[in-house]
Amino acid sequence: MRIITVAAAQMGPVAKAENRRQVVERLIAMLETAAGRGAGLVVYPELALTTFFPRWYFESETELDAYYEREMPGPETAPLFEKAKRLGIGISIGYAELTPDGRRFNTSILVGPDGALLGKYRKIHLPGHKENEPWRAFQHLEKRYFLPGNLGFRVFDGFGGRIGMCICNDRRWPETYRVMGLQGVEMVLLGYNTPIHNPPAPEHDRLSWHHNSLVMQAAAYQNATFVVGVAKAGMEEGVHHMGGTQIIAPTGETIASGVTEGDEVIVADCDLDLCASYRQSVFAFERHREPDAYRLITGTKGCVTPEEAVRIDPALGHED
Ligand code: CDV
């Protein structure tokens, strides 16, 4: 058995007026709760340190800059990292990253129990829009405020296993997990901020929880991995974000789930050896995958006509 006792530290809303010190205090309180329950790794949500600022269109760059971290840990976030190191607990946390040369990413990092940086991920699938769209009940300007991640879907060895990260909208795309699955990932850590109301497609709203579980459970099963999905939930600045925090086994079953929309810690003992049962049988990739039949997946970004598909992958035009 290779057990990781993992905690998903769901957050309730973070108000616009809340400062980093206040947020870090909340994160530390959950770290202590997780430590008391024997956790060795605590996973926090996407953009955990501030309110979900892409809901607003900012004219002023200075106003926007206030939501980004120029260093991690920085002076205000260091107490969280110091506390985690003292407790011998690893953490994964999402934040807005502003690089020294001015690039902006929606980032998460994985830090080992000794405080060492084990890995960094920059969100690849950025939802929403780039321009001001005041007709929306609220905006979703991730395409304006972040660049698509440039680090790919890497995996990192630590905690006695192989860990990957992705962020929020990434969880809806099967490619996200398959790229990590092909590197033998055993636990995918992902935080999210998901407004229940989707202004361009309100007919999806009632299905938010179904879609959340559906994509993460399917991915866990199809890639023989644990998935830890962690929400920032609740009514934040007038926008209702879903909870649905859960820890999912490679069986596709949710083995722990949150029940509130506030700060809440859920914990599960995850035996990474369970991944092998699936990866060595139904999802033994090296025996059963047929990559030659999947060329269209990397050959086009959007849908194409069947004729265009044949141009990209001539095998789709074979007669017999
Ligand atoms: N933060 C996100 O990426 N949110 C998206 C919403 C906008 C659909 C999500 O996929 O949950």
Image (cartoon, grey):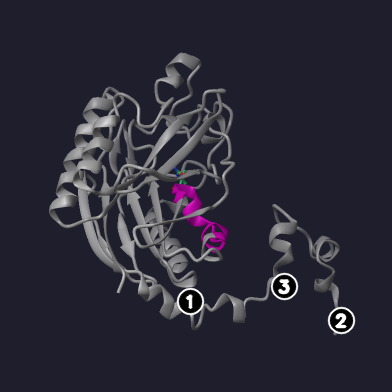
The answer to whether mark 3 and mark 1 are in CB contact below 8 A is no
Can see residue 41? yes
Residue 3 point in image, percent of width and height? 28, 67
Disc 3/disc 1 C-alpha distance (Å)? 21 Å
Q: Please give the range of residues in magenta.
A: 166-179
- Pick the front one: 56 or 95: 95
Q: What type is the residue that disc 3 sits on? A: Ala
* Nearest the eye: 66 or 200: 66
Which class describes the residues within 10 Å of circle 1: few (<14), some (14-19), or many (20+)?
Answer: many
Whether residue 138 is visible, yes or no, is no
Three-letter code for the amino acid on which mark 2 is drawn: Glu
Left or right, residue 317 beside residue 203: right
Checking the image for residue 319, the label placed there is 2
Tell me which residue sits at (29%, 48%) in the image.
113
Does the residue at mark 2 contact the one at mark 1 (Cβ under 8 Å)? no
Residue wearing tag 3: 293
Dot label at residue 279: 1
Looking at the rendered structure, the kind of residue marked 1 is Arg
Distance from disc 3 to disc 2, alpha carbons, whole Å, reads: 15 Å
Give me the disc on residue 268: none
Residue 72 inside the magenta-drawn segment: no
Left or right, 169 with respect to 249, comes to: right
